[in-house]
Image (tube, grey):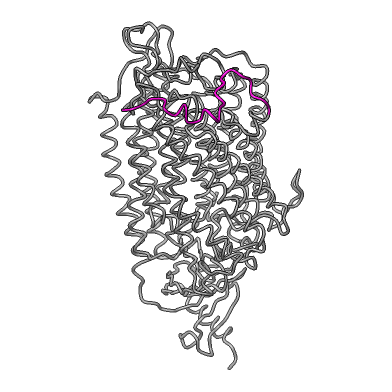
């Protein structure tokens, strides 16, 4: 069963590792807590003629069963926070130099893309404009300048593990570097009205040759 | 500290002072001031609203499993109706089911009885609270029938979508939703003030702060959280209403507004709200587990501190709902830290409940099964929250079905499993009759297994990239796979099974209401004051005016050494014991 999406960007693996780290830590606590829970339920089920213990929970030899796991959780929290902040910093705060910049405009209910074209610059006559279809080159850092014409949208490419809300009145830069050629979903991930459920686009991750060929073929005649 | 019943004369006029007269229909249902009737009104209204919430869930789950098919009892669900269904489902289940049942119904019923008072301190305010709530529920349901139908912009109502009828296409529905929510909040604000004042001022003589049953504490803390957090949202709701109808631009960036501002106002309320409904449910666990383990609550003070700690921390985590919403990315680091830290008090609270089982003599009655079910299921909701609090991972999980599965593993254990625990436990006190235990257990196992069948597959679809609020996955090539579709079908079929098992509950409830065996005044042999009323169910005033209870000990004195009985009610004087 193919459920887990392939990691398709340079940082997808970092996010997946963070997810695994969290799974390891919370999985440990989940299993230990449930073992304890079900053991106590079985061990102390009502037996005819046997009276329950009278304890307040403040006896030091009992309370340490709460206190020690408690300290251990604080330690786990520190590990989780460090892991999460490192990944976050890398993806959202520390943007690498752009190899190509693409303008992405969300509107009810379509994505339009403005690629820089042959000269590599946006807002020049050779820009390539497309709807619901984005073309990028594998191994190149792409900056997506996210804009919205109307309501909130969210630019989400699950194979890249990338998600960024798109806000009218602002330009927000998201980046990615694709690693595996192919064609993948771009999905709107923020409720944007009746057509939210059909606001799909596709991203074409192309080898350098394919990408050049596409630029040559798609460039407007000037 | 002063614990006199000085509130008695305060509402003599409201009660007319006559304790032994059978209330007329008018007094009982239209202008009640008795906290028990108001509690029942909240309870039945909340449960009735759950039928709406459940029906919406049925509609959109059918659409997701069998896209564009004709749905029995409805017909074909359009995209607009789909959006309205998910929006109304979320709003109804949180604001019109979880809140009225967990806080208002149980708070109204339990607080005076558990602290040994004859009623709420402000009985007429209490009535006002319910009547405002009823009004808000009527407005909400009516919005489904106005032109273009109910609001469909998700229960978070993010502007600009919610602020402009040209975007949402539901100009009337949006405004009605907003008015309904604001009126509902006013209702709970009034009710919450009443709970806090009553618990502070009307406790029985001798009841110290640490003799107060935990659920009373929990409902008061929840009411305080609600009071402290709801102001910004009511202000935001007024601003959004102005945006919709008067042409202001608080949240519209076309004319200088800021849509993110609404998100802050919403989630500053929205996250504490989670704990507003969580705490009463954990309070029920704290009441029920000691009774059926015949065991003192493990470390009463620590349970209380974890609840207060959770409540305080809950005010500093709201922006974890907005990691990818366009806030300054540096802010995410702060909110990751506060969010992950909330695991400390919550985990400790769960450990304390589990530790209460140690050395017990555990009876697996229906209420006990439900209470244990809260702990078991909420644990899954708790640990999966860590994925969401960790900003780096949330980037992927945000607005996927992983989120949906996560918060249903918190809300369902709270709002349904917790309610069933409380309902089956206090049913003998509310209605004077016992429920059928066998039917109760059938309902328990059917509900628990099908609930996990609904939401465990949704963790997997979320991991596979399924976004929320999608009308038809066939439009997304990567999501229209047979594997994901099979998981969606498993989830929907489980929902149908869950709905089917609720008929067992409805049957059991109505059969027991009228024909159940008569319950004694203290059928579970519990220690708290509500079980000491001379009549069952308690009549107006709860105790005879000359025999109000006094309190001599804490709320959980079970299996005390040297006593024949394994429970020691709070009101039994030491010498007589």
Which residue sits at x=68%, y=50%? B63
B81, B449: nearer the viewer: B81
B317, B131: nearer the viewer: B131
Give how far across and how far down residue B305 sits, in percent.
Answer: 32, 36
Image quadrant for the N terminus of chain B? top left
B96, B56: nearer the viewer: B96
Image quadrant for the C terminus of chain B? top left
Q: Which residues make up the magenta segment?
A: B1-25
Say whether residue A182 is left or right of residue B315: right
User: Is residue B428 among what the camera can see?
Assistant: no
Which residue sits at x=55%, y=40%? B129
Say whether residue B508 is left or right of residue B294: right
Q: Which secondary structure class fits the magenta region best?
A: loop
Give how far across and how far down residue A159 sits, in percent.
Answer: 49, 61
Magenta span has B449?
A: no
Give how far across and how far down residue A165 sits, in percent.
Answer: 49, 65
Which residue sits at x=65%, y=51%? B85
For this orientation, the residue located farthest to the bottom is: A222
**Residue B426 to residue B142: above or below:** above
Give how far across and how far down residue B461 sits, in percent.
Answer: 55, 50
Image quadrant where residue B211 sits: top left
Image quadrant where residue B470 sits: bottom right
Magenta span has B4?
A: yes
Say how many tags the image has.
Answer: 0
């Amino acid at each position: 069963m193919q459920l887990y999406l392939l990691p398709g960007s340079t940082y997808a693996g970092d996010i997946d590792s963070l997810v695994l780290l969290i799974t390891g830590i919370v999985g440990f606590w989940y299993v230990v807590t449930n073992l304890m829970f079900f053991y106590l339920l079985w061990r102390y089920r009502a037996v005819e003629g046997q009276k329950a213990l009278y304890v307040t929970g403040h006896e030091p030899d009992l309370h340490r069963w709460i206190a020690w796991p408690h300290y251990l959780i604080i330690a786990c929290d520190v590990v989780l926070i460090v892991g999460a902040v490192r990944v976050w910093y890398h993806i959202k705060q520390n943007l690498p130099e752009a190899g190509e910049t693409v303008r992405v405009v969300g509107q009810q209910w379509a994505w339009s893309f403005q690629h820089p074209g042959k000269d590599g610059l946006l807002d020049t006559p050779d820009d390539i404009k497309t709807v619901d279809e984005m073309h990028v080159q594998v191994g190149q850092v792409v900056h997506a300048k996210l804009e919205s014409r109307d309501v909130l949208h969210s630019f989400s490419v699950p194979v890249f593990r990338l998600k960024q809300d798109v806000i009218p009145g602002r330009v927000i830069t998201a980046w990615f570097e694709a690693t595996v050629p192919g064609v993948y979903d771009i999905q709107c991930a923020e409720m944007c009205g009746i057509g939210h459920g059909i606001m799909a686009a596709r991203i074409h991750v192309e080898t350098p040759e394919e990408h050049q060929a596409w630029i040559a073929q798609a460039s407007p005649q000037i | 500290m002063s614990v006199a019943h000085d509130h008695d004369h305060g509402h003599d006029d409201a009660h007319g002072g006559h304790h032994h007269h059978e209330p007329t229909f008018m007094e009982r249902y239209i202008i009640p001031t008795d906290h028990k009737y108001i509690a029942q009104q909240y309870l039945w209204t909340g449960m009735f609203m759950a039928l709406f919430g459940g029906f919406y869930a049925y509609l959109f789950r059918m659409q997701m499993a069998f896209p564009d098919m004709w749905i029995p009892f409805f017909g074909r669900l359009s995209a607009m109706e789909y959006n309205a269904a998910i929006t109304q489902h979320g709003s109804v289940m949180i604001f019109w089911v979880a809140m009225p049942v967990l806080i208002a119904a149980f708070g109204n019923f339990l607080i005076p009885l558990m602290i040994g008072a004859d009623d709420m301190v402000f009985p007429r305010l209490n009535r006002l609270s319910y009547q405002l709530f009823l009004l808000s529920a009527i407005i909400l349901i009516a919005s489904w029938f106005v032109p273009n139908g109910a609001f469909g912009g998700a229960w978070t109502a993010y502007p600009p979508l919610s602020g402009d009828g040209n975007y949402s296409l539901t100009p009337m529905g949006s405004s009605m939703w907003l008015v309904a929510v604001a009126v509902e909040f006013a209702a709970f604000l009034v009710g919450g003030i009443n709970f806090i004042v009553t618990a502070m001022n009307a406790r029985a003589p001798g009841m110290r702060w640490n003799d107060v049953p935990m659920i009373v504490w929990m409902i008061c803390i929840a009411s305080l959280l609600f009071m402290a957090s709801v102001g910004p949202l009511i202000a935001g709701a007024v601003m959004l209403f102005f945006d919709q109808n008067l042409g202001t631009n608080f949240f519209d960036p076309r004319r200088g507004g800021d849509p993110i501002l609404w998100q802050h106002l919403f989630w500053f309320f929205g996250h504490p709200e989670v704990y507003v409904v969580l705490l009463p449910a954990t309070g029920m666990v704290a009441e029920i587990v000691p009774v059926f383990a015949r065991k003192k609550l493990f470390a009463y003070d620590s349970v209380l501190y974890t609840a207060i700690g959770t409540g305080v921390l809950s005010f500093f985590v709201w922006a974890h709902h907005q990691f990818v919403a366009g806030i300054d990315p540096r802010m995410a680091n702060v909110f990751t830290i506060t969010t992950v830290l909330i695991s400390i008090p919550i985990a400790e609270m769960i450990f304390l409940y589990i530790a209460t089982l140690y050395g017990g003599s555990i009876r697996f009655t229906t209420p006990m099964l439900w209470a244990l079910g809260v702990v078991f299921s909420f644990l899954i909701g708790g640990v999966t929250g860590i994925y969401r609090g960790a900003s780096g991972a949330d980037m992927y999980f945000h607005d996927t079905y992983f989120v949906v599965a996560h918060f249903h593993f918190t809300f369902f254990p709270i709002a349904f499993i917790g309610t069933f625990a409380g309902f089956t436990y206090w049913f003998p006190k509310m209605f004077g009759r016992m429920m059928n235990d066998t039917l109760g257990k059938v309902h328990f196992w059917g509900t628990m297994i099908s609930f996990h069948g609904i939401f465990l597959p949704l963790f997997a679809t979320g991991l596979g990239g399924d976004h929320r609020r999608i009308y038809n996955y066939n439009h997304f090539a990567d999501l229209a796979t047979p594997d994901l579709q099979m998981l969606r079908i498993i989830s929907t079929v489980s929902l149908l099974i869950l709905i089917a098992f609720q008929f067992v509950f409805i049957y059991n409830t109505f059969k027991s209401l009228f024909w159940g065996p008569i319950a004694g005044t203290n059928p579970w042999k519990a220690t708290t004051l509500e079980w000491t009323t001379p009549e069952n169910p308690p009549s107006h005033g709860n105790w005879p005016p000359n025999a109000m209870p006094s309190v001599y000990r804490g709320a959980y004195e079970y299996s005390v050494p040297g006593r024949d009985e394994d429970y020691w009610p709070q009101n039994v004087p030491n010498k007589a014991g």
